[in-house]
Image (cartoon, rainbow, N blue to C red):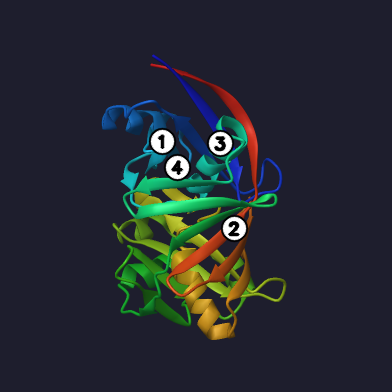
């Protein structure tokens, strides 16, 4: 069996920035074990698979170790492949996913994703969170709609300075950890750690902005927000809080196109 595969740097204006995602278009679903093996072989934070479905597509995402329910950067990368390579005449694509229908449309050179709104609230946090981060946050938030802790810090410098203990954070499974702070250059910054999913630090994480955008919109008193994920690769996100959703926009750049042989 021969399959096409693309690798796209999402939330980046050029290659070698943002978050690389593999995208594998299919005509029908593979066995789950095959998709997981491909994701493990790619060893990227996410590999996306999609199949035609009622004029649009079904979409699934796999880390090197498991399937996940929501992924932003691999959705952006999948939309880039559909709207720029496979069906360049289209302006909008819908994906049926484990998190419902996700819509992505063109906005000039940007791709605009319509994602679920997940407002976070103050939360108790286990000792492994504080020990794993090493620097105590101002507050910890969580939302029942995902499995992440959101640690809020006083400054961007504190977020950048974090050197987490991966083994301690891994004990939080199934929870990942997003850290965030205000910024002087943009509205807010973030980083994301999910070592129990085979992703010690994710370069850019669209999904955590479903919670971060409602938090910062409320705190800053504005609905349109400019965000940076300050990982080593870095990534830029343009966000807007709407009544029932979060719009997350970004650029994307194709890095490679090739074939998988099974």
Q: Give the alpha-carbon distance from disc 1 to disc 2, as whole Å.
A: 20 Å
Q: Residues within 10 Å of mark 4 (few under 14, many from 20)?
A: many
Residue 196 % position (x, y): 34, 51
Structural crowding at the residue carrying mark 1, measured as other residues with C-alpha within 10 Å and reported as few (<14), some (14–19) or many (≥20): many
Q: Is residue 247 left or right of residue 228?
A: left
Q: Residue at 27%, 32% (x, y): give it.
A: 32
Q: Residue 249's mark?
A: 2
Say which of 52 and 161 sits in front.
52
Mark 3 and mark 1 in contact? Answer it, CB < 8 Å.
no
Bin the neighbour count of mark 3 within 10 Å (Cα to Cα): few under 14, some 14-19, many 20 and up. many
Q: Which mark is residue 50?
A: 1
Q: Secondary structure at mark 3?
A: helix
Disc 4 and disc 3: Cα gap in Å? 15 Å
Q: Position of residue 156 (x, y in %)?
A: 62, 72
Q: Earlier in the sequence, mark 4 or mark 3?
A: 4
Q: Residue at x 41, y 65 (%)?
A: 132
Pointer 4 residue: 46
Q: Are discs 4 and 3 less than 8 Å apart at CB?
A: no
Q: What residue does disc 3 label?
A: 81
Query: For the residue labelled by badge 1, is the local secondary structure a helix, a strand or a loop?
Result: strand
């Amino acid at each position: 069996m021969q399959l096409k595969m693309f690798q796209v740097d999402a939330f980046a204006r050029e290659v070698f920035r943002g978050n690389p995602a593999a995208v594998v278009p299919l005509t029908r679903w593979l066995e789950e074990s095959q998709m997981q093996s491909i994701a493990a072989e790619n060893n990227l934070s996410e590999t996306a698979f999609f199949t035609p479905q009622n004029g649009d597509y079904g979409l699934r995402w796999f880390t090197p170790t498991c399937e996940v329910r929501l992924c932003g950067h691999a959705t952006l990368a999948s939309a880039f492949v559909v709207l720029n390579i496979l069906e360049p005449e289209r302006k909008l694509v819908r994906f049926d996913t484990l998190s419902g229908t996700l819509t992505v449309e063109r906005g000039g050179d940007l791709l605009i994703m319509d994602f679920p709104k997940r407002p976070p609230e103050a939360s108790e946090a286990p000792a492994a969170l504080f020990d794993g981060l090493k620097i105590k946050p101002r507050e910890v938030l969580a939302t029942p709609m995902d499995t992440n802790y959101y640690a809020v810090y006083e400054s961007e410098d504190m977020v950048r300075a974090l050197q987490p203990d991966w083994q301690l954070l891994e004990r939080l499974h199934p929870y990942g950890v997003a850290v965030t702070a205000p910024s002087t250059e943009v509205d807010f910054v973030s980083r994301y750690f999910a070592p129990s999913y085979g992703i010690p630090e994710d370069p850019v994480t669209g999904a955590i902005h479903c919670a971060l955008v409602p938090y910062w919109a409320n705190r800053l008193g504005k609905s349109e927000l400019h965000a940076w994920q300050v990982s080593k690769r870095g990534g830029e996100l343009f966000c807007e809080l709407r009544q029932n959703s979060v719009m997350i926009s970004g650029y994307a750049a194709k890095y490679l196109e090739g074939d998988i042989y099974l």
